Image (cartoon, rainbow, N blue to C red):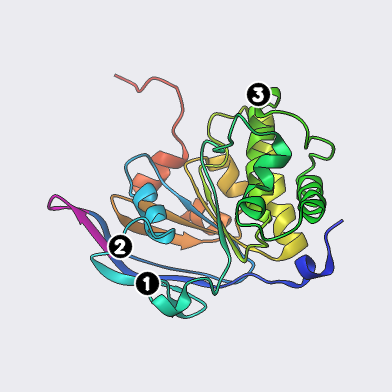
Amino acid sequence: MMNDATNNHSGVSLRVSRLRKSFNGEEVLRGIDFEVQPGEIFVIMGPSGSGKSVLLKHLIGLEAPDEGEILINGEAIQSPEIAGKYRMALVFQSGALLNSLTVGENVGLYLSEHRLKPPGEIKRVVEEKLEAVGLKDTADKMPNELSGGMKKRVAIARALVIEPQLILYDEPTSELDPLSAAVIGREIVKLKQRIHVTSLVVSHDRDLAFGIADRIAVINEGRILTIGTPEEVKQFNDPVLQKFLHADFQHESP
């Protein structure tokens, strides 16, 4: 069971305004604008090469924009004054677990490395976060004993250790079978319901996006095509979007 402090903390707002980025003279982000409300599940969806990964790198501070700004609760993340003020976590596409450590050691790594809590308290927190993602009694297992979907859930548990107000998910269902992907989607929704965290999901997984999102932003060639509820996005009449939404393995007619 989660403690009261976890239950009471709330998500933050995120605003991206007029974001532009070029590499070697090629503009990759072309004036990106969107806003995520506190506690919302906001999915950024689009085909490969659309600018999703570059946008995510800006959100976590690995890239600086040529123009525009990123605001958390109305404060620019580039500002030195904001450092450490808000708790943000990233769930990597690969899971990024350390194979030499147990599941519990992976989840509690941040706390132990920074000596933020005594060992007994770290153990309690780790067990709590693993239970929160449906992985009770797995702390002593090694990552190679887990399925791909379980590894992703361990990565989510590790993100929860810092009591995040914003979680960024990078392609959370990549390389997973449909059943495992559905489990990850349900975990993202449950976290919203339990701790009211703001969730931004970057994905090309159409089933995930339409299954969990409060709103979806569709990006293509560095621009936002549309933003809306899943139903609004499905009805948006744009040939690029409709081709992406209805792509399948059928051969085109000659």
Q: Amino acid at mark 3?
A: Asn
Q: Position of residue 171 (x, y in %)?
A: 51, 42
Neighbours of disc 3 within 10 Å: few (<14), some (14-19), many (20+): some
Q: Which residue appears at 83% of the width and 64% of the height?
A: 3
**N-term-proximal mark, 1 vs 3:** 1
Instruction: For the residues labelled 1 and 2, say whether their Cβ atoms are less than 8 Å apart.
Output: yes
- Disc 1 residue type (three-letter): Gln
Could you tell me if residue 69 is visible in this image? yes
Q: Secondary structure at mark 2?
A: loop
- Which residue sits furthest right? 1
At which x and y percent is residue 207?
58, 40
**How far across and how far down the image is residue 247, in percent?**
44, 33
Front disc: 2 or 3: 3
Above or below residue 50? Residue 8 is below
Q: Which residue is mark 2?
A: 64
Helix, strand or loop status at disc 1? loop
- Asked whether 254 or 54 is in front, the reply is 54
Label 3, on which residue? 144
Secondary structure, mark 3, is helix
Q: Spatial distance from mark 2 to mark 3, Cα to Cα?
A: 36 Å
Magenta residues (range): 20-27
Q: Tell me the crowding category of disc 1: few under 14, some 14 to 19, or many 20 or more residues within 10 angstroms, Cα based.
A: some
Q: Are marks 1 and 3 in contact (CB under 8 Å)?
A: no
Nearer to the camera, 60 or 97: 97
Residue with the mark numbered 1: 78
Q: Quadrant of the N terminus?
A: bottom right
- Specify whether residue 237 is in view: no
Q: Disc 2 or 3, which lies upstream in sequence? A: 2
Mark earlier in primary sequence (1, 2): 2
